[in-house]
Amino acid sequence: MKCHTRQSYRERKVSLARQISLGTAAILVVAMLLGLQFIWRYTMSVLSERDKDAAFKELRNAQEQIALVYDSVCSNINLLLYDRDAIAIASESNVHVTREYLSHVRNIHTLLTGMEQDNQYIDSLFLYINDNAFISTVVTNSVPFDARTIPILQSDFYQEICDSVYQIRITTGHEINEFHGYLDPSAKNLPLITIGCASGSTYQNLQKRAVMINLNAKMLDSLLRSCFGEDSCVYLLNENLSILQATHTVDGAGLDLSPLANGNNTTGQFPASLHGSTGQAVYMRNENNGFTIVKYISDNENRQDATALEIIFFVVFILCGAIALVFMRYWIYRCLKPLDALCQKMSELESGRLGVQIDLALRNELGNVIQHFNLMSQALAKMDEENREAEKALHVQEILALRAQINPHFIFNVLNTFKWMALSYKADDLEECIAALAEILLPVFREDIGPIPLRKEIHYLKRYLLILSHQFGSQVRLDISLDPTLESVPLPPLTLQPIVENCVRHGYVPDGPALAIRITALAEDDTLTISIADNGCGMDGETLLQVQLSLELGENSGSDGRHIGLANVHRRLTLNYGPQYGLRIQSTPGTGTTVEIRLPIPNPANSGTP
């Protein structure tokens, strides 16, 4: 049976180790999946924030560069609109090709050419005066023309800049051949970015000057690429959010810029997608010139970085998890080894081997369990030994009780026989002692031995003193001083007599002074304290300590049974009334001994006077 139990426990131990290992592995897998998801999201968030911060720096730099180009173009527009030669030509109602007229034209043409050469972002310049004079860096002379034959003069853009007095506007999509009818249509056909502005009075007095400057798209593209990189996707928008320049071909699958129309913030970002890839678009708007630059940031590169970090995390986690599982398996079997020893000792304990011990000193919870098991095993062994000793003592007491079983009526009959014999032989002292002894033994032999009033106990004590007077004469005196209101307090019978007897037995000195025993009582709250003091020889410190210890343990002091009366009285009082009541002993060698009896005073409402 033991072998089967042992084998069964080993099987359970292996199963427990397997269950703990599988549970830990499952927890590691869940932790790994959660960790991968967290690392992915956290990495993408950090990288996106990094890209956004870097993009805002690039946008700010690009806006500064665009602002410089825009300010330089605006300066050129101001110079042309308020040039005195242009004003002189505009002041004439008709075109008169005179020497003075040609001089004005050459001066304006020289100014236009210088502007184009000084500013690398200017592709071409056009100056229209009163819709009948035309000066440009593309056409070298000025000739009268019919405004109806020039496409740009029929456009909405031209109408807008003429209707608004000195308000710079920007447009895109026009080609170079639209600015004059004599230009070669095949010369340049790329879309242009045109900045235009008009100044002057109304059409009637023909005081109108309109300037249109076409920007070099390649130079703007180079500017954007130098600010953002060759592979960046960047849009340059005007105040109407029309695309002026883009670093990549704009087609139907281009960036959706509609979120820009829903907000008025100068900077911001919004989710975007381009050619099937997702990412984010960051933008910055310049409130002075109305230009908005948008940069698209794809998540592809960030995904690659996050995936690479996930792979590194996965490999490291797997290695750490494998090492953790190996150490965990070792730790499990190390922890289960004490349990194996504990199970074995418990089997021995079940078989009857009390007191078995486990010789393992562990400083953990298992160590506490093993320590408590050892204590329990020792306690069981001690309890078993005490039970055996108690059985032996009980057997002896049973024998003594059998020997002491004498019928109380037989004892009274014998005492009466002694009493009549004393009367017959006229031994009055003997008759008096026998009568006193019979009266003292009367409450002991009653079937219902209950508390008696203090006055009866004092009566029995006086009868006992009568017996002592025949032995010691006047060498033993008893002084009793009690409050009459305390005489009805109940107490167990023969409580005072054993203490007085103990005073006589140990305090009386033959051929010495008379032994005086004084009995007083004091009521305090609901407690009665009866003091029995003598002037005998007293006890030394060692003997007093032994007696006090015997009262606490409820045992006789000494192997010879000395002070057995004190221990019996104290035990009866604590059993009847509780551990807070009983005897207290104080003694001084050569001075005497004092014994205090503490009793509860019953409530008169709950009990009557005996």
Image (cartoon, rainbow, N blue to C red):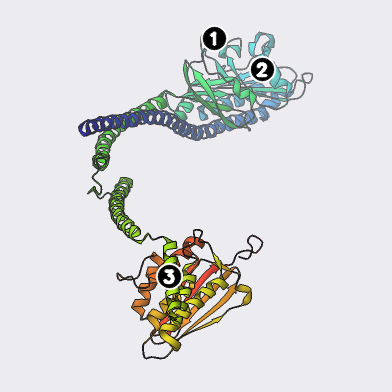
Give whichever of discs 2 and 1 has the lower sequence position.
Answer: 2
Q: Amino acid at mark 1?
A: Asp
**Quadrant of the snapshot with the N terminus:** top left
x, y (%) of residue 286?
Answer: 60, 32
Image spot of residue 445 (x, y percent): 46, 63
Q: Count of labels shown?
A: 3
Label 2: which residue? 157
Q: Nearer the viewer, mark 2 or mark 3?
A: 3
Q: Secondary structure at mark 1?
A: loop
Residue type at tag 3: Thr
Vertical placement of residue 361 versus 499, above or below? above
**Dot 2: few (<14), some (14–19), or many (≥20) neighbours within 10 Å?**
some
Residue 351 drawn at (x, y percent): 24, 40
Please state which of residues 280 and 490 is positioned toward the viewer in this rendering: 490
Task: Say which residue label 1 marks.
Answer: 184
**Occupied quadrant, residue 197:** top right
On residue 253, which mark appears?
none
Characterize the local packing of mark 1: few (<14), some (14-19) or many (20 or more) Cα atoms within 10 angstroms.
Answer: few
Between 341 and 122, which is closer to the camera in this rendering? 341
Disc 3 is placed on an element classified as helix
Which element type, helix, strand or loop, lies under badge 2? helix
Return the x and y of residue 18 as percentages of the image width and height: 28, 29
| Mark toward the viewer: 2 or 1 | 2
Do callouts 3 and 1 mark residues in contact (Cβ within 8 Å)? no
Name the residue located 47 percent from the left edge and 65 percent from the top edge. 444
Asked whether, in this view, residue 304 is left or right of residue 203, the answer is: left
Residue receiving disc 3: 417
